[in-house]
Amino acid sequence: MCPCCSMMGMDREVLDIIEVVRQEYGKPMIINSAYRCEKHNEAIGASPSSSHALGLALDIRCESSGERYGLLRHLMKHCTRLGIGNGFIHADWDHLNKPPNVVWAYYD
């Protein structure tokens, strides 16, 4: 749900895929960010073309390199767009306007 309006906007296929990842990973996964309505997306300064606003992305908390490795190992089987940030992994299934088979870092 969007944190500002409680609108449910996650794509059902993405939810099904992330449940498979969670089962394979075998540990709880904390979602920092998932669906965002247009108003909330704008309020936090995110890109207007954010995949979160389409319900096609989520950010999963990971706080250690071992946790990051384990999550990536499972996410890469099911997701073709991944971003690595400080304390999270962005998993993205937005293939409408964005290239697949990419990994990027949010680090400066």
Image: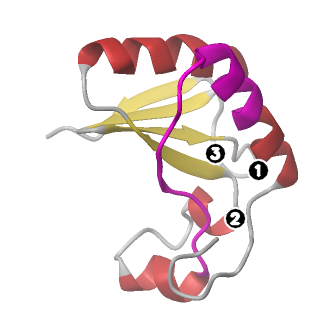
Residue 76 in sight here: yes
The answer to whether 89 appears left or right of 94 in the picture is left
* Amino acid type at mark 1: Leu
Place of residue 31 in the rendered image (x, y in percent of width and height, measured from the top left) = 50, 49
User: Which segment did they paint magenta?
Assistant: 18-37
Residue at 60 percent across and 57 percent down: it is 51
Q: Residues within 10 Å of mark 1 (few under 14, many from 20)?
A: few
* Disc 1: which residue: 96
> Which image quarter: residue 54?
bottom right
Q: Nearer the viewer, mark 3 or mark 2?
A: 2
Q: Nearer the viewer, mark 1 or mark 2?
A: 2
Q: How far is disc 3 from disc 2 in space, using C-alphas?
A: 13 Å
* Disc 3: which residue: 98
Place of residue 32 in the rendered image (x, y in percent of width and height, measured from the top left) = 43, 54
> From the viewer's perspective, is residue 104 above or below residue 70?
below
User: Would you say residue 24 sits in the magenta stretch?
Assistant: yes
Place of residue 61 in the rendered image (x, y in percent of width and height, measured from the top left) = 39, 40
Could you tell me which secondary element the residue under label 2 belongs to?
helix
> From the viewer's perspective, is residue 47 above or below residue 58?
below
Could you tell me which secondary element the residue under label 3 belongs to?
loop
* Amino acid type at mark 2: Leu
> From the viewer's perspective, is residue 33 above or below residue 107?
below
> From the viewer's perspective, is residue 35 above or below residue 101?
below
- The mark nearer the N terminus, 1 or 2, is 2
* Disc 2: which residue: 54
Could you tell me which secondary element the residue under label 1 belongs to?
loop
Check contact, mark 1 vs mark 2: CB within 8 A: yes
The answer to whether 5 appears left or right of 15 in the picture is left
Residue at 35 percent across and 32 percent down: it is 62
Check contact, mark 1 vs mark 3: CB within 8 A: yes
For residue 55, which numbered disc appears in the image? Answer: none
